């Protein structure tokens, strides 16, 4: 014990002696020393705090701050992490100052990488809602994780724990552009990996989610199988995702260009006029002038523009003040020189390139290109100029009003450079004119007659510098039509979308960019009232034709394991269907071992659906499947999980499989048709099945036997145990079979109805308590008996 601390509390040596390990038990136990409480008058239990310094107990609570040099050198092999000792202090020792701020504060808020600062410079606090969110998995998966604490709105968030989920923010952006939402939901083609189709399916889930989180699983699956995405480096490797070394700020800007071009190509085949081209397309004229005097003119369709910033040669050179509209104009009407091939000279020659715009788009998409320290510094300085101007203006206004309210509104303009509204037009001499405009004002009739338009900022996508790679979020101005559908109120509101975290924000927050931790990546401006020019009705739902049998992908003769629905069997609203699905593993689970010996899931295993079976519930063909599709996959399977799925190597290979092999899209459309028809699905553990298939099914269309035979807050019981206990069946002996499991779930549902309608709810609860008692007695293992009759009921 520290001598100075002991003297400060005026402890006498005699008093201390009783508190030594040898005298502790006798002195503190009233049974061994009856005079203890009287002699010491409760002093040991009510010691006065005489020191204002830190307590010794703080040494146990506080952990030392992680040195950035160590954090950046960590290498992970399997489940273990290693780092070379930087020799800051001896092995098994740490430097610690008890007077410092608790280390966990810095560790959770530090930003190790920034375009403007190095690791050694000051750390920046990232607001909690902007940090990368993570799902905490329990032994039962997602059960118990409270998504609603992250999203109190009616808009769906997106889960991040799937490959290439860095583009979640831009998927949300596309959904909240009404013409795109309607375009992709009306699009349906035969192409297996079509992003427009998959976005349409996902946006359909968004429409009916009611605020529950969704996954972009099938969208990103199609995305990973598009050759152009791979060629552009948009597919993150497992190493890049695991280590967080990808430069996602640049990546999302390349993805922005890719997705617009991809949707333009996929949808224009079915449309007489490309909606993407009409929305984003700008008619530009590119001129290239060689030193020999030869001029080349091209007129391509441009879907977005990259921001360009003035060069400044040295750090000592003062950065000039620019208006955002001025920089935007120079970025659109670009002038630059480079070496280019000249057909006249038959050589590469210095060439001057100029670009002029002939037609303004309805949606102005901008890549901010703040990818270096110079660009970040330029943005920061321009924001400071704008803030100083706002403060001066506020001071002048306050002075004229006697000093009332000076700087109150101007403070909101800190870190703000971009305007909320722009006025844009093309003059008679084909010159582009851009200027900032008050958001609340409209154009005059004369200005509209001259072709001027107002563009409102509706999207900002920043790169949040928090951790190694950081994360991407989106600020989106959600329009009236979305609020009308979700909450029945016509309004506009800015929201923050950070994966499954969704939160309303003030409009000022959407345009504030403190580049030390929040770097602008993408901006979208839309022409005011632009959506009135587009057809916003969903006209092409999935129809019954998708239920017809399609040719199997298998090149060999297949075994008949199902019988398609006849015309007189077509399912309608309220009809029942038994369903089960089997899965294979594409990525192993990643866990870490805590210091207390417990394990924590960093990333869950990534599954892919391999077989989907739907069986009839009624009629002469009851129990016979009408869908039994094996799903082909282009991705590497790391584990077929044969013991649990019944899928064997080769079953999903079209060259050697003997199964009815189809594409995921083909089977997905069948299930979508059944859902849209109002069919009710019966199965065991359907929540997980629909989650992996990537379907949003209304709760009143799902009957899950895992929930029917479960007491509140108790463990879920396996289908195998329930089948033995209630039906006397010994299923899943060697492996699982989706047809057997679906039929067993149907029998359990019928058994539940017999119990409920035969004896009432009280009797059902009695049966369930007996079920759990028996399960705990047997440790939920079925006796090694061949039961041919129901065990208990």
Image (spheres, rainbow, N blue to C red):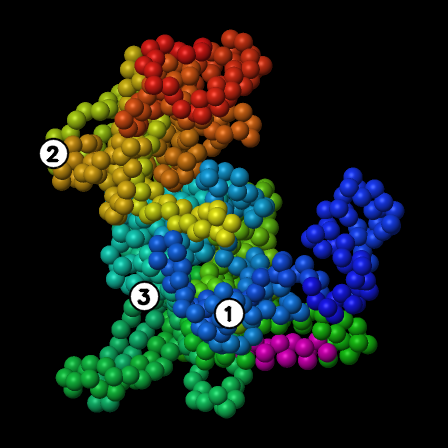
Nearer the camera: disc 1 or disc 3 = 1
Residue located 20% across and 38% down the image: 649
Q: Is residue 132 magenta?
A: no
**What range is drawn magenta here?**
382-395
Q: Residues within 10 Å of mark 3 (few under 14, many from 20)?
A: some
Q: In which image quadrant can residue 279 be found?
A: bottom left
Q: Is residue 384 magenta?
A: yes
Q: Which structural element holds mark 3?
A: strand
Nearer the camera: disc 2 or disc 3 = 2
Disc on res. 301: 3
Residue 191: horizontal and vertical position, in percent?
Answer: 25, 45
Residue 399: horizontal and vertical position, in percent?
Answer: 77, 79
Residue located 50% across and 57% down the image: 132
Res. 182 in view: no
Q: CA distance from mark 2 to mark 3?
A: 47 Å
Q: Which residue is mark 2?
A: 556
Q: Residues within 10 Å of mark 1 (few under 14, many from 20)?
A: few
Q: Earlier in the sequence, mark 2 or mark 3?
A: 3
Q: In which image quadrant can residue 165 be found?
A: bottom left
Nearer the camera: disc 2 or disc 1 = 1
Q: Residues within 10 Å of mark 2 (few under 14, many from 20)?
A: some
Q: Which residue is mark 1?
A: 67
């Amino acid at each position: 014990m520290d001598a100075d601390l002991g003297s400060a509390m005026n402890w006498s040596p005699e008093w201390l002696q009783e508190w030594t390990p040898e005298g502790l038990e006798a002195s503190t136990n009233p049974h061994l020393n009856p005079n203890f409480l009287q002699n010491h008058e409760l002093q040991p239990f009510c010691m006065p705090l005489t020191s204002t310094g830190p307590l010794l107990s703080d040494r146990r609570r506080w952990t030392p701050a992680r040195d950035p040099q160590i954090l950046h050198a960590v290498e992970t092999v399997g489940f273990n992490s290693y780092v070379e000792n930087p020799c800051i202090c001896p092995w098994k020792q740490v430097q610690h100052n008890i007077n410092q701020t608790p280390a966990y504060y810095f560790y959770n808020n530090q930003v190790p990488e920034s375009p403007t600062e190095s690791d050694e410079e000051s750390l920046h606090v990232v607001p909690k809602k902007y940090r990368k969110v993570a799902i905490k998995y329990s032994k039962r998966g997602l059960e118990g994780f409270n998504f609603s604490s992250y999203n109190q709105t009616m808009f769906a968030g997106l889960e991040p724990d799937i490959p290439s989920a860095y583009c979640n923010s831009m998927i949300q952006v596309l959904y909240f552009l009404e013409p795109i939402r309607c375009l992709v939901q009306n699009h349906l083609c035969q192409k297996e990996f079509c992003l427009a189709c998959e976005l349409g399916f996902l946006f359909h889930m968004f429409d009916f989610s009611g605020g529950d989180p969704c996954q972009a699983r099938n969208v990103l699956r199609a995305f990973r199988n598009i050759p152009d995405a791979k060629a552009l480096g948009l597919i993150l490797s497992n190493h890049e995702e695991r280590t967080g070394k990808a430069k996602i700020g640049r990546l999302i800007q390349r993805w922005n260009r890719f997705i617009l071009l991809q949707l333009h190509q996929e949808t224009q085949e079915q449309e007489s006029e490309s909606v993407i081209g009409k929305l984003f397309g700008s008619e530009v004229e590119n001129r290239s002038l060689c030193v020999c005097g030869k001029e080349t003119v091209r007129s391509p369709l441009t879907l977005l523009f990259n921001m360009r910033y003035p060069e400044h040669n040295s750090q000592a050179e003062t950065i000039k003040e620019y208006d955002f509209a001025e920089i935007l104009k120079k970025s659109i009407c670009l002038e630059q020189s480079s070496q280019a091939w000249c057909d006249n000279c038959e050589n590469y020659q210095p060439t001057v390139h100029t670009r002029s715009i002939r037609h303004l788009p309805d949606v102005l998409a901008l890549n901010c290109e703040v990818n270096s320290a110079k660009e970040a510094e330029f943005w920061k300085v321009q924001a400071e100029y704008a803030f100083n101007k706002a403060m001066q203006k506020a001071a002048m206004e306050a002075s004229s009003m006697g000093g009332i309210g000076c700087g109150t509104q101007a403070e909101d303009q800190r870190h703000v450079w971009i305007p909320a509204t722009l006025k844009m037009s093309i003059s008679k001499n084909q010159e582009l004119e851009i200027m900032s405009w008050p958001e609340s004002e409209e154009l005059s009739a004369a200005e509209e007659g001259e072709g001027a338009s107002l563009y409102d900022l509706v999207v900002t996508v920043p790169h949040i510098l928090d951790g190694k790679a950081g994360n991407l979020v989106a600020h989106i101005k959600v329009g009236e039509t979305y609020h009308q559908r979700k909450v029945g109120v016509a309004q506009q509101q800015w929201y923050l979308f950070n994966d499954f975290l969704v939160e309303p924000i003030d409009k000022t927050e959407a345009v504030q960019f403190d580049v030390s931790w929040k770097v602008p990546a993408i901006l979208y401006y839309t022409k005011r009232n632009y959506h009135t020019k587009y057809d916003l009705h969903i006209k092409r739902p999935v129809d019954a034709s998708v239920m017809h049998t399609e040719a199997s992908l298998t090149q060999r003769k297949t075994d008949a394991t199902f019988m398609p629905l006849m015309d007189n069997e077509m399912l309608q609203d309220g009809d029942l269907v038994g369903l089960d699905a089997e899965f294979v593993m594409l990525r192993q689970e990643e866990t870490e071992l805590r210091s207390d010996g417990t394990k924590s899931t960093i990333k869950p295993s990534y599954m892919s659906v391999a077989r989907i079976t739907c069986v009839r519930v009624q009629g002469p063909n009851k129990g016979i499947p009408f869908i039994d599709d094996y799903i082909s996959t282009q991705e590497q399977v790391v584990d077929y999980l044969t013991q649990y799925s019944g899928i064997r190597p080769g079953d999903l290979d079209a060259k050697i499989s003997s199964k009815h092999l189809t594409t995921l899209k083909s089977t997905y459309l069948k299930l979508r048709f059944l859902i849209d028809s109002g069919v009710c699905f019966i199965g065991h553990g359907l929540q997980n099945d629909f989650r992996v298939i990537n379907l949003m099914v209304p709760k009143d269309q799902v009957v899950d036997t895992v929930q029917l035979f479960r007491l509140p807050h108790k463990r879920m019981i396996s289908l195998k145990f329930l089948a033995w206990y209630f039906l006397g069946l010994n299923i899943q002996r060697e492996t699982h079979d989706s047809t057997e499991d679906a039929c067993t779930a149907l029998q359990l549902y019928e058994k539940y109805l017999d119990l409920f309608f035969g004896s009432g709810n009280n009797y059902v609860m009695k049966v369930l308590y007996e079920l759990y008692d028996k399960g705990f007695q047997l440790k939920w293992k079925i006796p090694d008996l061949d039961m041919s009759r129901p065990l208990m009921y």
